[in-house]
Image: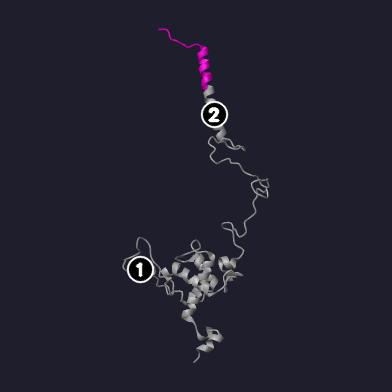
Amino acid sequence: MNKFFPPRIILFAASLIGTLAVIPFAVIAWTRSAPSSGRPIHIIQDMDYQPRFDTQEVNPLFADDRAMRPQIPGVVAVGQSRDDVHFSEGVVDGAWAATMPEQVSVTMEVLNRGRERFNIYCSACHGYSGFGDGIVNQRAMVAMSNADGPIYGTAWVQAKSLHDPEVRDQPPGQIFNTITHGIRNMAGYAAQIPPRDRWTIAAYVKALQKSQDATLQDVPPQERASLNP
């Protein structure tokens, strides 16, 4: 029986076509593995390449023809320390501020604002009088006392009385910082309460503490005379 062998030209053509068919895949594999200083090829552009202005380039969109926009006064980058640490952190010369910042003067308007903010954000745990007997704290203490252990893996810590000597002796800057960043189990309120309102709360807390621990000597002399029989 005779065997059929294809002509050599067909074998050569098949080998050539097979080799050529492999070349694109080899080039792609080499391109993907070899480092390149050029930009990658983006078939779907999306937002990879957009019209933009280079540094110091002219931009006719603005009246001053400047592409680089000047900083807006008062804007602070995220995470950047503020220059006025007295107002932003409650610190003066590395110690807790014993005075209010110049942006917040202690007036009846400020104290009333602080009382309003305190009643909204703080009284739930600390109570309206600051003795740590807020309604949330009362409910949590009852729930914990009726449980054999932590409820759903959590526990409740008695809210701090603002009249404890440990807290009563704190300067306004420390109270402001605690409101801002929180302490121990208490979360910070920087995201909910603006800085000025945090200072009004700190001022009101000091007034609240003084109302429970005041002496006759704390009364101004001109007012003290009227109190004597």
**Residue count near mark 2 (Cα–Cα under 10 Å), binned few <14, some 14–19, many ≥20:** few
Which residue lies under the disc numbered 1?
139
Please tell me which of labels 1 and 2 falls first in the chain: 2
* Membership of 12 in magenta stretch: yes
Name the residue type under label 1. Answer: Arg
**Residue count near mark 1 (Cα–Cα under 10 Å), binned few <14, some 14–19, many ≥20:** few
How much space separates mark 1 and mark 2, taking CA atoms?
Answer: 71 Å
Q: Which region is colored magenta?
A: 1-18
Q: Position of residue 80 (x, y in %)?
A: 59, 58
Which residue lies under the disc numbered 2?
26
Vertical order, 95 against 154 (above or below): below
Furthest-bottom residue in this view? 229
Query: Where residue 157 is drawn, which disc sits there?
Result: none
Identify the residue at image location x=50%, y=64%.
193
Vertical order, 196 against 218 (above or below): above
Identify the residue at image location x=42%, y=7%.
2
* Membership of 14 in magenta stretch: yes
Furthest-front residue in this view? 63
Q: Nearer the viewer, residue 58 or 138?
A: 58
The majority secondary structure of the magenta stretch comes to helix
Circle 2 SS class: helix
Name the residue type under label 2. Answer: Ala
Q: Position of residue 166 (x, y in %)?
A: 48, 75
